[in-house]
Image (cartoon, rainbow, N blue to C red):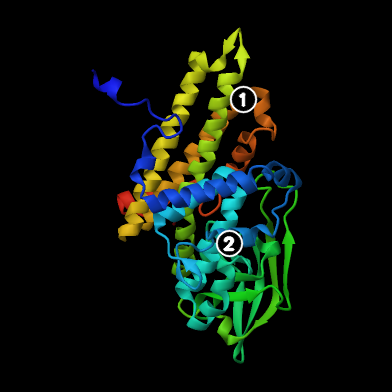
């Protein structure tokens, strides 16, 4: 008997058998989140996307699932491994990028900022309720004129006795319009500092951005701070300079590396299934050479991208992951996921532009994922600096 006769044919959706590289606990996390997505997200997501909504009650459902801040320790958080967190991101984004974005902003940006840079009192006050989805957070760094260059932000915080007064505008803020609190980064006389701003604070307002054609199942907002008066204890005491917000962004970028492969897998799976049932010229298009070439390219990149995410996750759990390696993952996996979505759309033909199938929704979403948490150009320059030792940012 030959070797090929003894080994079963690989799974078309896990061609490299990566599931076997996971622990029992990691597989349980993956199955649990995948089941939640299949039961709660997929039957409704096309409607949410079309209507431009993400139900607020989903926050507590995700909290009950245990995925909000799941990689943090204590304060009601699971203390899961980086790989387990990544797998949750993958399965959430297989549902929709907007759902994964909500979880990422809640856990890896807002909660992580408090967890890493907050006082003990701040952690006790906010993190348990955020982990449960009872409080929703957002992360205010990007401004209308300053996205890739956050050091030039204009939002300003100045002393007023023992208080702080914040003024400025933040733009493209996920969950801003439904948030109970915002992590706001502002210029001070002591450099860039972070503040916890509760949405009920006088002078704080949010305006949702309408008519967007990407991440529609996600609340995206402009935040305006007009002389918001904050007590001294609203300051995140351990965050000084740009290293604070950049550390948070690195956490979110890690999740995106995994999540993008969830969207890519969903597009590939839809194209593969469709190709087997769509008949042209008397036979299924899956038997055509050009269609098979597209499907093979998708399978290659989904498996390679997932393998990359898993490798980075193991490095993160071992404490050996450098931020530039996270940029490697984000740049590669989002770029390839978008290419997979576009190719899958072509396999589906005209059906590919309808919400009956997930492909155009993922494709539109990935156009935003390509830009946020660092554009492709920014990650390219981060990698360029890492491999040459020379910065091309200035």
> How far across and down, in percent of the image, does residue 74 sit?
45, 72
Front one among 273 and 103: 273
Residue beneath the point at 49% across and 77% down: 118
**Placement of 155 over or under 346, stated as above or below:** below
Quadrant of the snapshot with the C terminus: bottom left
Q: Quadrant of residue 222?
A: bottom right
Query: Is the residue marked by circle 1 packed among few (<14), some (14-19), or many (20+) residues within 10 Å?
Result: many
Q: Mark 1 or mark 2, which has the lower sequence index?
A: 2
Q: Nearer the viewer, mark 1 or mark 2?
A: 2
Can residue 174 be seen from the camera position used here?
A: no
Quadrant of the snapshot with the N terminus: top left
Report the residue marked by disc 2: 64
Check if mark 1's residue and mark 2's residue have beta carbons within 8 Å. no
Q: How many marks?
A: 2
> How far across and down, in percent of the image, does residue 105 sit?
56, 60
Residue beneath the point at 33% across and 53% down: 314
- For label 2, the SS is helix
Residue 348: mark in rendering: 1
> How far across and down, in percent of the image, does residue 341 sit?
56, 34
Residue beneath the point at 64% across and 48% down: 40
Can residue 41 be seen from the camera position used here?
A: yes
**Along the horizontal axis of the image, is 14 left or right of 280?**
left
**Placement of 99 over or under 64, stated as above or below:** above
**Along the horizontal axis of the image, is 383 left or right of 51?**
left
Q: Quadrant of residue 358?
A: top right
Front one among 365 and 307: 307
**Placement of 89 over or under 199, stated as above or below:** above
> How far across and down, in percent of the image, does residue 30 sit?
47, 48
């Amino acid at each position: 008997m030959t070797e090929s006769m003894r080994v079963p044919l690989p799974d078309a959706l896990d061609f490299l058998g990566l599931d076997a590289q996971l622990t029992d606990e990691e597989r349980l996390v993956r199955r649990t989140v995948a089941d939640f997505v299949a039961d709660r997200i997929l039957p409704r997501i096309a409607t949410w996307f079309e209507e431009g909504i993400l139900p607020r009650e989903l926050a507590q459902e995700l909290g009950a699932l245990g995925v909000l801040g799941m990689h943090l320790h204590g304060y009601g958080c699971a203390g899961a491994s980086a790989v387990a967190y990544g797998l949750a991101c993958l399965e959430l984004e297989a549902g929709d990028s907007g759902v994964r974005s909500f979880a990422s902003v809640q856990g890896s940006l807002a909660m992580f900022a408090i967890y890493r840079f907050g006082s003990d009192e701040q952690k006790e006050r906010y993190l348990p309720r955020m982990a449960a989805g009872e409080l929703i957070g957002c992360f205010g760094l990007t401004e209308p004129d300053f996205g890739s260059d956050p050091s030039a932000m204009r939002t300003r915080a100045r002393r007023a006795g023992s208080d702080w007064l914040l003024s400025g505008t933040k733009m493209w803020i996920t969950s801003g319009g439904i948030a109970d609190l915002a992590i706001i980064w502002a210029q001070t006389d002591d450099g860039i500092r972070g503040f916890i701003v509760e949405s009920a604070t006088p002078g704080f307002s949010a305006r949702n951005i309408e008519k967007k054609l990407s991440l529609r199942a996600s609340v995206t907002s402009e935040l305006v701070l007009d002389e918001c008066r904050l007590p001294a204890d609203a300051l995140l005491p351990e965050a000084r300079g740009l290293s604070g917000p950049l550390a948070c962004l690195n956490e979110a970028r890690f999740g995106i590396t995994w999540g993008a492969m969830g969207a890519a897998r969903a597009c590939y799976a839809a194209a593969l299934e469709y190709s087997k049932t769509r008949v042209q010229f008397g036979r299924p298009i899956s038997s055509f050479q050009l269609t098979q070439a597209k499907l093979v390219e998708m399978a290659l990149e989904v498996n390679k991208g997932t393998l990359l995410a898993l490798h980075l996750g193991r490095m993160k759990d071992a404490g050996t992951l450098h931020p530039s390696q996270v940029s490697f993952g984000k740049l590669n996996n989002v770029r390839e996921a978008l290419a997979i979505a576009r190719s899958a759309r072509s396999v589906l033909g005209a059906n590919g532009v309808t919400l009956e199938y997930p492909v155009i929704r993922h494709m539109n979403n990935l156009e935003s994922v390509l830009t946020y948490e660092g554009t492709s150009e920014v990650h390219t320059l981060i990698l360029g600096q890492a491999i040459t030792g020379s910065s091309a940012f200035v």
